[in-house]
Image: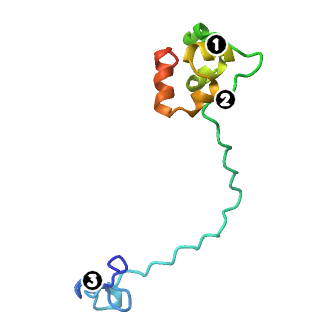
Amino acid sequence: ALLRGEYLCSACAPAPNGYPKEAKSEAEMPPKLEEPPKLEKEPKDVPAPAPAVPAVLPARSGECMTLEELRDADVWKARGIDASSREQMLSDADFQAAFGVSREDFGKLAGWKRTQKKRELGLF
């Protein structure tokens, strides 16, 4: 109710015509503001939201890298690997050996735990 102006004192409340009470003639009154244009209910040409990306994607066949390669920035940058998801390029066996858990179990960990494990392995 306060935000709608129902509880303003008489000095602060606008006059019924919408102009300040101090204005005595129409020349002293500020121009009335126009109503903003009403928006359509659905904007046009809005792209669909991107699909959600799982926390850990399975390794892509034929594109596996070793842990040593993933630690070397020159190597993984040259191959266009995303810095935040380098662990995805490990083979399933290397992933299990490095992280001590399967990809599925790693994906179930809290984000800070995944980051901590990647940091321990030099992948963050």
- Whether tag 1 and tag 2 are in contact, CB under 8 A, the answer is no
Q: Is residue 29 above or below residue 78?
A: below
Residue in the image at 61% along x and 9% along y: 69
Mark 3, secondary structure of its residue:
loop
Of 20 and 10, nearer the camera is 10
- From the viewer's perspective, is 116 left or right of 9? right
Residue 94 image label: 1
Q: Is residue 67 above or below residue 44?
A: above
Residue 8 image label: 3
User: Can you tell which of label 3 and label 2 is closer to the viewer?
Assistant: 2
Of 27 and 45, nearer the camera is 45
- Whether tag 3 and tag 2 are in contact, CB under 8 A, the answer is no
Q: Amino acid type of disc 2? A: Leu
User: Can you tell which of label 3 and label 1 is closer to the viewer?
Assistant: 1
Q: Residue 29 falls in which quadrant of the image?
A: bottom left
- Whether tag 3 and tag 1 are in contact, CB under 8 A, the answer is no
Q: Residues within 10 Å of mark 3 (few under 14, many from 20)?
A: few
What colouring method underlies this structural image? rainbow
Mark 2, secondary structure of its residue:
loop
Residue in the image at 65% along x and 42% along y: 52
Q: Is residue 5 above or below residue 92?
A: below
Q: Residue 17 falls in which quadrant of the image?
A: bottom left
Q: Amino acid type of disc 1? A: Asp
Q: Which residue is mark 2?
A: 57
Q: CA distance from mark 1 to mark 2?
A: 15 Å
